[in-house]
Structure formats: structure tokens, C-alpha cells
Image (cartoon, helix red, strand yellow):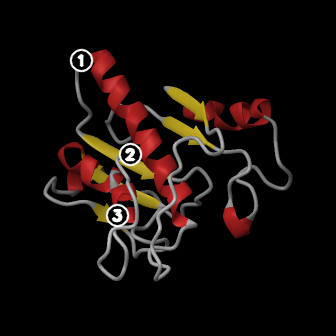
Amino acid sequence: SQGCVWDSFFYLDAEDGGGAGTIFAPAPSSKQDAAAALASFAPTRVVWHQEGAGVVPNSCTDGLPDPTSHPQLWKLAACYRMVEQHEREQGWQYTWVVRARPDTGWLENAPPVQAFTADRIYVGQPSVWPLNDQFALIPRHLAGVYFSAINSFYACGDGSTGGSGSE
């Protein structure tokens, strides 16, 4: 934690994992198995996704953005809403927000947060449209930009509007 105080929030889907399989491989696990696996994080909140909750598909005729990106972006926004709710309940805001997938491995320790300036969002190369979904280091005052990526789902590649998306 490098001298930082941190909380962890998980918005999980036991059936999630795309083509790579489920997060809790080798077989779909129970919520109890997941809770045991996440215990070392001492999560502040854990919410389980309900399929179809809030998903509004776009109507883009050009295929851009890819409709399969919607659930991932929606879940990302849902987790951020948990962070915002916690901040309201506590009466303060975090300085930084880190988005890290629980199924991502690390080859070495990250530099201390003090090595980063708070004027930009730090992400890797995009792996899933429209952003890298593996890791992001985000100054709190810019977090709304990153976590509202779901809104871009409704802007079609051809410039038209692909439906309503006030997530």
C-alpha cells in the first residue's frame, strides 16, 4: 500500500470472463468460494451483478462500437457508483481511484502513487474498446471521465446516435 490507505470494491459476475473462461477458474464457483478468494482484499463492498440489470443495447448499424463491450462498461460504471456511494456515506472523497481486474497478474510492484501527477489518467494500451480494462490509475477529480466510458457506447462509429444511454 506504500503508505496509502485504500479500500477495495468488487462488482462481480460469476459467469463473466468472455472467451477466457470464468474469473474463478477452473469451474464456475459459488459466491462463497469467491468470498473466500477475495478475503485477502478485505473488501469494503461486494455486489453481484444481475444479468440484464440496466443493459440497454445500442442500435448502431455499422457495428461500432461492438455490442459485446456494453456489459463490461456497464459493470465498470456500477462499481464506480459503489465508490461514489461510499464517499457520500463517509463525507469525503478519495484522492486516487485504481481500477484493477481481480484476474490480472503482476510481474513487479507498481511505483508509489507519489511518482504520478494528478493531471492525467494512467492506463495501458487499449485492449477492449474504448479503453484498457486491465488497470487504470485515476486522480479522483478525473474518475468520472474514465468510469463514464459507458456513455460512448451510444455514439456510433459513423457519427450517428445509437440509442439512449444515461447510465
Q: CA distance from mark 1 to mark 2?
A: 24 Å
Name the side, left or right, on which 106 lies relative to 86: right
Closer to the camera, 149 or 25? 149
Q: Residue at x 54, y 68 (%)?
A: 67
Q: CA distance from mark 3 to mark 2?
A: 11 Å
Q: Nearer the viewer, mark 1 or mark 3?
A: 3
Q: Residue at x 58, y 50 (%)?
A: 102
Residue 70, compared with residue 125, is above or below; it is: above
* Residue 142 visible, this orientation: yes
Residue 138, disc: none
Residue 152, disc: 3
Residue 95 horizontal/vertical position (percent): 23, 38
The C terminus: image quadrant: top left
Residue 91, disc: 1
Q: Amino acid at mark 1?
A: Gly
Closer to the camera, 92 or 6? 92
The N terminus: image quadrant: top left
Instruction: Tell me the SS state at disc 3.
Output: helix
Query: Badge 3 local density, few (<14 within 10 Å), some, or many (20+)?
Result: some
Residue 27, compared with residue 19, is above or below; it is: above
- Sequence order check, earlier mark of 1 and 3: 1
Q: CA distance from mark 1 to mark 3?
A: 30 Å
Q: Amino acid at mark 2?
A: Glu
Residue 154, compared with residue 99, is above or below; it is: below
- Sequence order check, earlier mark of 1 and 2: 1
Q: Quadrant of residue 50?
A: top right
Which residue in the structure is indicated by mark 2?
Answer: 167
Q: Amino acid at mark 3?
A: Ser
Instruction: Tell me the SS state at disc 2.
Output: loop
Q: Residue at x 27, y 43 (%)?
A: 96
Query: Badge 1 local density, few (<14 within 10 Å), some, or many (20+)?
Result: few
